[in-house]
Each structure stands twice: as C-alpha cells, then as structure tokens.
Amino acid sequence: NAGVTQTPKFQVLKTGQSMTLQCAQDMNHEYMSWYRQDPGMGLRLIHYSVGAGITDQGEVPNGYNVSRSTTEDFPLRLLSAAPSQTSVYFCASSYGSPSGSYEQYFGPGTRLTVT
Amino acid sequence: GDSVTQMEGPVTLSEEAFLTINCTYTATGYPSLFWYVQYPGEGLQLLLKATKADDKGSNKGFEATYRKETTSFHLEKGSVQVSDSAVYFCALSDYNQGGKLIFGQGTELSVKP
C-alpha cells in the first residue's frame, strides 16, 4: 500500500492564482481530512469528509473548497490564493471518525508559498 | 470549545535523559486522547492513544496516562535517544464536537548525543 499520497510536495503561487492540492489514499478509508500547519499553532482542520459525496467544514474553511467524488481522492482547491494561505498542508485518512479513536494516517505534506 | 495546551518548546535533552512533555485539555464530553509524532520532513504518525479515564497508552518506550481529574495526558519516556528528536503533538477527539481531531501547538524535542 502507498498509504496517503499528496502532490505536489512544494508549490509557489502568486496572489490571486488558483490551484488544487491532490490527496489520494489506497486503504479504503471512509474518513478523510485536510489540515494546515502553521508555526506555533499546531494543525488546524480545514475540511473533512466522512465518505464519498459528503463533506463538511472544519475550523478554518474560508478560501478553500473540497469535493469527494470517490473514496480514494479528496482534492483541496484554493480559489484565489492569498499570502495568509502560506502554510504546510496535510491530508489524512482513517477507517472511521477520530472520536472512535481510529488512527489517522497522514500524507507527507505540501509546502505552499503565496507571494 | 474544546482545546489542547502543550508545554512550550523547544525541549533539549541529553541522550538517556528522562522526558516529560505536558499536555492539558478542555472538553465538554469524554474525549479520546492522542499523541502524534512528526519526524523532520515527514507527516504525523500516531504514537499512542487512550480512550477513557485512567487508560495508559504506550508505544516505543513512551507512555501517557489519561487523567480526568487533572484533565491531563502528559507524555513520558524514561531514556530518550537521538532518534526521538521530533515534534510531538497532543490531540483530542470529542464525539460531542463532531469527532474532529483538535491538536495542541506541538513541542519540538531535540536530543543531543
């Protein structure tokens, strides 16, 4: 199993550009989520999905869109990039919700810089 | 809302020293508690977890006990190694809050030979 894969690893955008961060998992996990990691703030949840066709907002959803058309893929779209979106983005998946104490498996991250 | 507070880093220790990283939480319900570790340049990995009061999670020589009376989940290891150098995150998940994972800010540990 490849686990959770993310592309690209690094990206530089100009303010106002749009792009999609890709995330895929091959573990048949129902639950997937996107986090951003900023210095001194830990990880903050952006959006999550409990299954194909179902998504919901997390703590910091503004400026980001998601969709879940298949179990395997959960792309994150930046509609109009802003410098405040400079961060490291992690995708994670798990068999079930974390409240059921299911382990979340994290991808290697995408480091995004917006100038 | 629910939150997690960790001791500030960075923490620098010599090899074979005793490690404690403090973690306290606030939650409205009965959360599950986790420690995740992030090695340089990698994503997070689950280190250990506990799902109810007085449970002890353990893995790779690390331990943490779920203390409801003090709302704490401190991470300990008796003898650290250079390979333990990483960032450690305490986290909780509360069914009453939709089961989302809420992280502390992370504590960077550096172990010197």
Image (cartoon, rainbow, N blue to C red):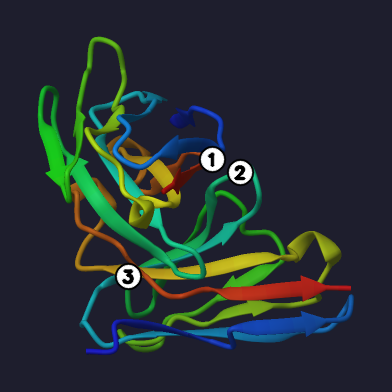
Depicted A108 relative to depicted B26: above or below: below
Q: Nearer the viewer, residue B59 or A22?
A: B59
Residue at 55% x, 30% y is B8
Q: Quadrant of residue B46?
A: bottom left
Residue B103: image x %, image y %?
45, 43
Q: CA distance from mark 2 to mark 3?
A: 21 Å
Residue at label 2? A41
Residue at 63% x, 42% y is A40
Residue at label 3? A93
Q: Amino acid at mark 3?
A: Ser
Q: Are marks 2 and 1 in contact (CB under 8 Å)?
A: yes
Discs 2/3, front: 2
Q: Amino acid at mark 2?
A: Met
Residue at 88% x, 80% y is A14
The chain carrying label 1 is B
B85 relative position to B31: left or right: right
Depicted B51 relative to depicted A68: above or below: above
Tell me, yes or no, whether dots 1 and 3 are on the same chain: no
Q: Nearer the viewer, residue A14 or B111?
A: B111
B8 relative position to B94: left or right: right
Residue B6: image x %, image y %?
47, 30
Q: Quadrant of residue A87?
A: bottom right
Tell me, yes or no, whether dots 2 and 3 are on the same chain: yes
Q: CA distance from mark 2 to mark 1?
A: 5 Å
Q: Quadrant of residue A55?
A: bottom left
Res. B105 mark: 1
Instruction: Quadrant for the C terminus of chain A, please.
Output: bottom right
Q: Amino acid at mark 1?
A: Gln
Residue B86: image x %, image y %?
44, 53
Count of numbered circles in the view: 3
Depicted B11 relative to depicted A81: above or below: above
